[in-house]
Amino acid sequence: MDKLDIIRNGFAGEKLRWEDFPDIGLYMDQVLLILSRNGGAFSGQEKLTPAMVNNYIKDGHIPRANGKKYSREHLAYLTVFTHLKHVLSVSDAGKLTGEILSEDDIEEGFDSFAAELKSAEEALILRLEEDSNEDTVMTALRLALAAYVAKAACEELISDNMEKE
């Protein structure tokens, strides 16, 4: 399997849509099952646990459940947050998630997030197709450096935005 196949297969199933989230109250085990099906791009990523969800709620990154039931809004928050926490600190991931999913229109915010994720995936695949003859080590280095630069810029933007508020 070449590097492009690895990337394409890694993103298989990353079709996040608000309307696919159930519009009924869900218990924690149901939430974890749904998120395990669309929560991360690659299988090696950390699995979400009930303790993690409870900590995110306790720290104010995710809204509290309604009793023991979670809504589609919780699924949206957890989806965005768990994607972002792979590249940002938990604190920054929480801040950015809160900004993306404003209470005014969580559905619109989630759809924007999903569209941006898809766009990033497509841009990466196009870039890798252009560099398909390049050595795998150099491709990995280029991706790591791009991630480093993007992460640093993102942290500055979050920091600058939070200082202004």
Image (cartoon, grey):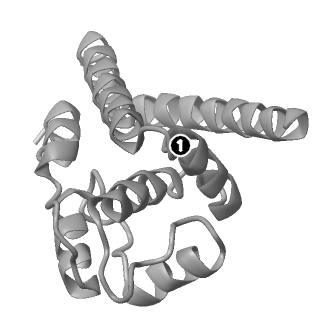
Q: Quadrant of the C terminus?
A: top right
Q: Locate residue 26 relative to residue 84 in the image: left or right.
A: left
**Residue 112 in picture, x, y percent from top left:** 37, 29
Disc 1 marks a residue whose amino acid type is: Ser
State the image quarter where residue 15 is shown.
top left
Q: Identify which residue is drawn at 24% across, 74% down.
A: 31
Against 53, is 158 above or below? above
As drawn, the residue found furthest toward the right would be 163
Q: Is residue 11 visible?
A: no
Q: Quadrant of the N terminus?
A: top left
Quadrant of residue 59 in the image? bottom right
User: In front: 155, or 81?
Assistant: 81
Q: Is residue 88 left or right of residue 117?
A: right
The residue sitting at 45% across, 79% down in the picture is 53
Kindly indicate the quadrant of the structure image that contains residue 158: top right
Q: Residue at x 16, y 36 (%)?
A: 8
- Find the residue positioned furthest to the top: 130
Image x and y of residue 16, in percent: 21, 43
Above or below, comparing residue 57 to residue 11 in the picture: below
> 158 or 69, which lies in front?
69
Residue with the mark numbered 1: 102
User: Residue 9 versus residue 24: which sits nearer the camera?
Assistant: 24
Number of marks in the rendered image: 1
Can you see residue 149? yes
Relative image position of residue 163 (x, y in whole percent) = 89, 39
Left or right: 114, with 15 as reference point: right
Q: Residue at x 22, y 68 (%)?
A: 36
Instruction: Give the SS element for disc 1.
Output: loop
Q: Position of residue 44 (x, y in %)?
A: 30, 66
Classify 10 Å Cα crowding around label 1: few (below 14), some (14-19), many (20 and above): few
Residue 3, relative to residue 92: is it above or below? above
